[in-house]
Image (cartoon, rainbow, N blue to C red):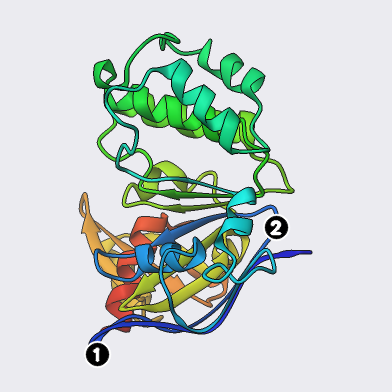
Amino acid sequence: MTDMIRAKNLSKNYGKFKALDNINLTIGKGKIVGSIGPNGAGKTTLLKAMLGLTSYDGELEVMAINPFKERAKLMEDICFIADVAVLPDWIKVNEVLDFVEQTHPKFSRAKAEAFLKKTKLGVKQKVKSMSKGMVVQLHLSLVMSIEAKLLVLDEPTLGLDIIYRKEFYDNLLNDYFDHERTIIITTHQVEEVEHILTDLLFIKDGRIVLDASMDDLTSEYFEVMVSNENYDDAMSFKPLQSRKVFGKHVMLFKHHNRGELEAIGEVQRPGVADLFVAMLKEEEPS
């Protein structure tokens, strides 16, 4: 099996509101996919469908399983971390390990204990005494100790300071990810994850407006720093977006010859956040 997720005409309506609007999508094995979109775009609804937490119209398979009809089977190979702490305040670290060990057949307690030794968490420590960063460390230690094929992260570092956020993604890459597993991340902190992504999804109004690999973006999109004297020449290439920074014009171009663009300014790959803003504006009706 090379496809972890396959969706065809996937839709979800809440009354007259279309949370998902005929989505067609394929996500392969060994990918780290960033799912980016404004609030209310459909990101969380798409994750819920993949996790079997909501019904839907159309077709959806996750590891060749119908997630809504066979959720128990699906959960054997999926882990999920959300931005909210779901552990009760009274529970201790060792009790969490006991529970997961008894309920998940693919959990390795030895691995979890090894990960926890790298933190300041004590086995007798209760969740109510932990900072949010510590709770995330506990979740991550549990997740990385389960032999799951798919990891879904929904704003996993929201509210954490920069040290915890960097540590989270470093641990994820170094101790969890391999080319047999797939990770899906939804986040508003795009700049922090773009260096680890293999693929990007931009979602707006329940539709996918971009589905591309990071390699494709490097070859298709260019950001050019243009001086005032080259402004008119640059505008003749019809940039997707133009903004002024420190007296120069930063322009975004698609499907242009790199050599021609280098003649009018300094060329580099655009940041994901800038590309996202430009594409959403491009999608808006004029």
Corner quadrant of residue 264: bottom left
Neighbour tally class for label 2: few under 14, some 14-19, many 20 plus, Cα within 10 Å: some
In the drawing, what numbered circle is on residue 285? 1
First-in-chain label (1 vs 2): 2
x and y percentages locating residue 146 in the rendered image: 63, 36
Q: Which residue is mark 2?
A: 29
Quadrant in which the C terminus appears: bottom left
x and y percentages locating residue 23 in the rendered image: 48, 81
Q: Which is more toward the observer, 219 or 137?
A: 137
Q: Are marks 1 and 2 in contact (CB under 8 Å)?
A: no
Quadrant in which the N terminus appears: bottom right
Q: Quick check: 278 above or below 110?
A: below
Element assignment for label 2:
loop
Looking at the image, residue 146 sits to the left or right of residue 68; the answer is: right
Neighbour tally class for label 1: few under 14, some 14-19, many 20 plus, Cα within 10 Å: few
x and y percentages locating residue 267 in the rendered image: 47, 58
